[in-house]
Structure formats: structure tokens, C-alpha cells
Amino acid sequence: MNLAELNKVAEAMVAPGRGILAADESTGTIKKRFDSIGVESTADTRRDYREMLFRSTEAMSKNISGVILYDETIRQNARDGTPLVKLLERAGSLPGIKVDKGTAPLPSCPGEVVTEGLDGLRTRLAEYRGLGAKFAKWRAVIDIGQPHVVPSYTCVNANAHALARYAALCQDEALVPIVEPEVLMDGGHDIDRCVEVTTWVLKETFQALFLNRVALEGIVLKPNMAVPGKKSAKRASVDEVADRTLRVLKACVPAAVPGIAFLSGGQSDEEATAHLDAMNKMGPLPWRVTFSYGRALQHAPQMVWSGKSENVAAAQRAFGHRAMMNGLAALGKWKADLERKAA
Ligand code: 5MM
């Protein structure tokens, strides 16, 4: 393992004012997104949509350090025949790849899932590296939305172990692993419960990373923020979310980790930006703190685009705006009135 090289890539992924675009929706998930805007999901429409984002030159070069691609996308060419990976490289953005195979029910743990994809992973990583990937992503899913029983130790432990096995293989194959243990926002739990479970999940994950000899200087952590469940009546202020999230992270994430790039998890676009900004305003922090958003970066451009070529320029502006707002939030320099001005 060349740790200096892995560390250089990890540092670039969380460079000041930049963050990661999660564009690795599996075929089923992107179909749901397209259904909501009345667009048929085909290999060509998926390509057109993602090409539109990747050709948003200013956003890509200024605020998007890297893009997580799906297996189909990393192999696709733009309409003019240029590989999509080349478009990213030209914009100065690093290509990454989702390598997990999604979740499957966990035996004897009703309602819980474990992420699959370790079989044959080394071979797939080597292929992705050949296709231009510089980093990878694996997402574990922990659901605390049900009132009792879950999460079980079996679920937290099985997912932490899989994340660590994946991360060790990535580093062996010269790819920086994004380690994503997501505690879902679904359900009616309050922020205290989210803090409790997120702390447990992160502790187990870092224990598993240690036991599997993963070098922390060569990873990027992609966690959820500490937020109440979507159905909870007890809401939390922006400052409370930022403060509680940072307390959890400081208790669980060693300073050797170069950066933390949050998922948005179903927060509104502006909430995800405001929370990130508030955390950076509470610095200095031991690691860089930025974004690796899917929905909170793509929702606005998707709505504007709606599958119509005449909307491409406006959709690119909408994407550029969210990328810029989150870039500012990654520096603690965002202000709510910047959103109003743009509107
Ligand atoms: C972009 O969506 C990613 C892939 O999801 P599926 O495997 O379910 O299709 C997803 O892992 C995403 O990277 C994270 O959930 C972060 O995205 P959000 O929308 O939560 O910021």
C-alpha cells in the first residue's frame, strides 16, 4: 500500500471549499428519481442527465472535488464519444465508484439489512482502477425507525465488519475507501436516540477498521449528521444539529482521518447546507468537514431539467448554485440570504 499516495487523494477529496457529488444511484433508485420528474429511465437518459451535471464546468472545477459513479456510468461515453470519466478529469474532479452491491435482509434480524458485495471485490476494484477510479464507496444502512428491537448488535457488527473488509481491500488496490455507515433519518426517534446509535455505529466501525489494519490517513468518512427522525415532533435547531454532530464525531473519529464528507440523508437542500456551514463555523476541527451529497445537490437540477434539452443550461445553473452554496458551507462562509438573492 502506498499510504502517501492514498493520503494525497483523500486530502484532495476534502480540499477546502470542495466536496463530493454522489451520483451513484443504482438503476432502481435513479428510476424513482426520474419517475418523479416524468422522465423514462434508460441508459441514454441516465447518460444525458449525468453528462449535463459533469459538463457544469464552473461547479465541477471549483466546488466538486470528486464524483461517485455507478458501474454503468463509469463505462459510459458522453454524446460526443468522450468517456464520462475523461469529462471529470478535465474538470479537475476525481472519478470514484460505488462498489457495494446494495443491501440484503440480515438472517434472524427482522427488518434489518447488511450490505453485500465482498465476493470478488478485489477483482472488481482492480478493474475500476483501470477505468480511472481513484476512490470507492460502500454504504452500510442502519435503520432506527422502528420502535423496538432494532438496531441489533448483529446488524451493527456485521455492517462494520463488511465496511472494514471493503476498506482494507480498497487500500490494497490503491483506491481511497469512502466509509459510509448511514443511520437513517426514517422514523419518529428524537435527536438523542440518533446521537446514541450513531455513536455506537461509529465506535464499532472504527474498531473494525483497526482490526482489519486499515490506515486511517487513507480513508474518507461519510456519516449521517445527528438529526431527529423525519417523523419526530421534537425538531432541532441548526446549531443543535451542528453541535451534537460534532460532539459525536470528536468522541469517535481519530484525528488521523483526513476528512469527513456528510451524506444528506433526506434533509432539505438548504438544511443540509446550513448544518454543514454551522459545523465549520464552530471550528477549528481536527479533520476537514465537507459534503458528499446525492439528493441535496441533485434535487434542484433534476426538477429544473425534467428531461428537456432546452432546460439544460438552467439545470446546470441550479446545480452550480447548490455546489457553490455547499462549497461556502464547507468553509463556514455560507449565509442564508445568498439563497434568497439567487432565487
Ligand atoms: C446517490 O445515492 C447513493 C446510492 O444509493 P442506492 O444504492 O440506494 O441507489 C447513496 O448511497 C448516496 O451516496 C448516499 O445515500 C448519500 O446520498 P444522500 O442523498 O443521502 O446525500
Image (tube, grey):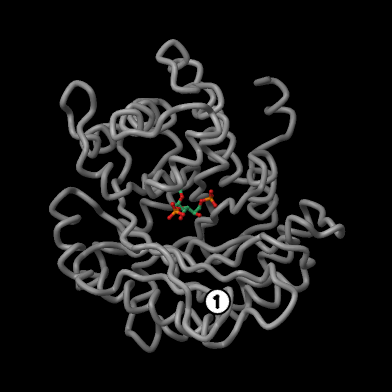
The residue under the point 38% across, 77% down is 162
**Three-letter amino acid code at disc 1?**
Leu
Q: Position of residue 184 (x, y in %)?
A: 61, 63
Task: Name the side, left or right, on which 58 lies relative to 240.
Answer: left
Q: Residues within 10 Å of mark 1 (few under 14, many from 20)?
A: many
User: Could you say which quadrant of the image residue 299 lies in?
Assistant: top right
Q: Position of residue 239 (x, y in %)?
A: 78, 55
The vertical placement of 230 against 59, above or below, is below
Q: Position of residue 157 (x, y in %)?
A: 49, 85
Q: Nearer the viewer, residue 87 or 47?
A: 47
For the C terminus, give its image quadrant.
top right
User: Could you say which quadrant of the image residue 88 lies in?
Assistant: top left
The residue under the point 56% across, 87% down is 153
Task: Name the side, left or right, on which 192 lies relative to 170.
Answer: right
Asked if disc 1 is less than 8 Å from ligand 1, the answer is no
The residue wearing badge 1 is: 202
